[in-house]
């Protein structure tokens, strides 16, 4: 997990346009990321560090613009760590995808109408999961697939990650 999360944070830095690369380490059995700051205490945890990077890049809109949107972004950042990263086995993965698919039914982005940090981090968290699913299985989660495909094509987000084919164009032939 540690290399994956550090790569995510480095990709986030790049997508935010931050010029200097921060120094990261990990701690504990779960390899929780740690950011060594120059003039303050170390920052611990993926979402804490990511929110700090957004502030540092002066892109606060990625954290939400209204009180409600900020709360929704925070909710999805927690979801990323507790549900997406915390899933155990295929049954829990299906539950995560099913719940997310239902939520995204009438939404373009996780926080509603605006692209936020929640979209970026949930995308990074789901990437290895969707990479392993067969196209037919991805089609069961049409809303997740639509959202995922949109985010992976958002400028500067995918970077080092391979593109994931999410929906197959079906050709229907009529046989009489």
Image: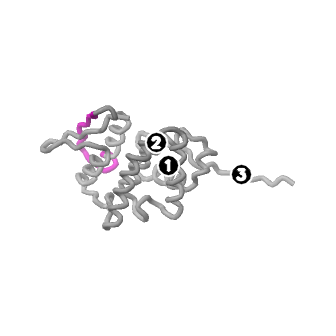
Q: Is residue 60 left or right of residue 8?
A: left
First in sequence: mark 3 or mark 1? 1
Quadrant location, the N terminus:
top left
Q: Is residue 80 left or right of residue 55?
A: right
Name the residue nearer the viewer: 89 or 64: 89
Q: Is residue 102 above or below residue 3?
A: below
Q: Percent from the top left, x then y, of residue 65?
A: 31, 65
The answer to whether 106 is drawn above or below residue 147 in the figure is below
Q: Is residue 26 magenta?
A: yes
Labels 3, 2: front one: 2
Q: Which residue is mark 1?
A: 96
Q: Nearer the viewer, mark 3 or mark 1?
A: 1
The residue beneath circle 2 is 87
Which residue corresponds to the image point at 12% horizontal and 44% vertical from the top-left? 39
Tell me the magenta residue range: 13-27
Tell me the number on the disc at residue 171: 3
Residue drawn where x is 25% and y is 53% of the image: 57
- Colour mode of the rendering: one colour
The residue tagged with tag 2: helix, strand or loop? loop
CA separation in Å, label 3 and label 1: 30 Å
- Distance from disc 1 to disc 2, alpha carbons, whole Å, reads 8 Å
C-alpha gap between disc 3 and disc 2:
35 Å
Is residue 50 shown to the viewer in this render?
Answer: yes
**Disc 1 to disc 2: CB gap under 8 Å:** yes
**Side (left or right) of 166 relative to 79:** right
Please tell me which residue lies in front, 117 or 159: 117
> In the rendered structure, which disc, 3 or 2, sits on the residue that comes first in sequence?
2
């Amino acid at each position: 997990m540690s290399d994956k999360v550090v790569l995510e944070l480095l990709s986030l830095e790049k997508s935010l346009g931050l010029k200097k690369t921060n120094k990261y380490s990990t701690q504990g059995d779960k390899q929780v990321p740690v950011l060594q700051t120059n003039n303050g205490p170390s920052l611990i945890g993926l979402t804490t560090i990511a929110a700090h990077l957004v502030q540092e890049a002066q892109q606060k809109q990625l954290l939400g613009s209204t009180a409600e949107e900020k709360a929704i972004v925070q909710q999805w950042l927690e979801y990323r760590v507790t549900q997406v990263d915390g899933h155990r086995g295929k049954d829990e993965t299906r539950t995560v995808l099913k719940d997310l698919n239902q939520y995204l039914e009438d939404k373009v982005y996780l926080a509603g109408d605006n692209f936020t940090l929640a979209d970026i981090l949930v995308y990074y968290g789901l990437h290895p999961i969707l990479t392993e699913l067969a196209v037919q299985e991805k089609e069961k989660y049409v809303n997740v697939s639509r959202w995922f495909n949109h985010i992976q094509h958002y400028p500067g987000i995918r970077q080092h990650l391979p593109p994931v084919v999410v929906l197959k164009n079906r050709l229907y032939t009529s046989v009489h």
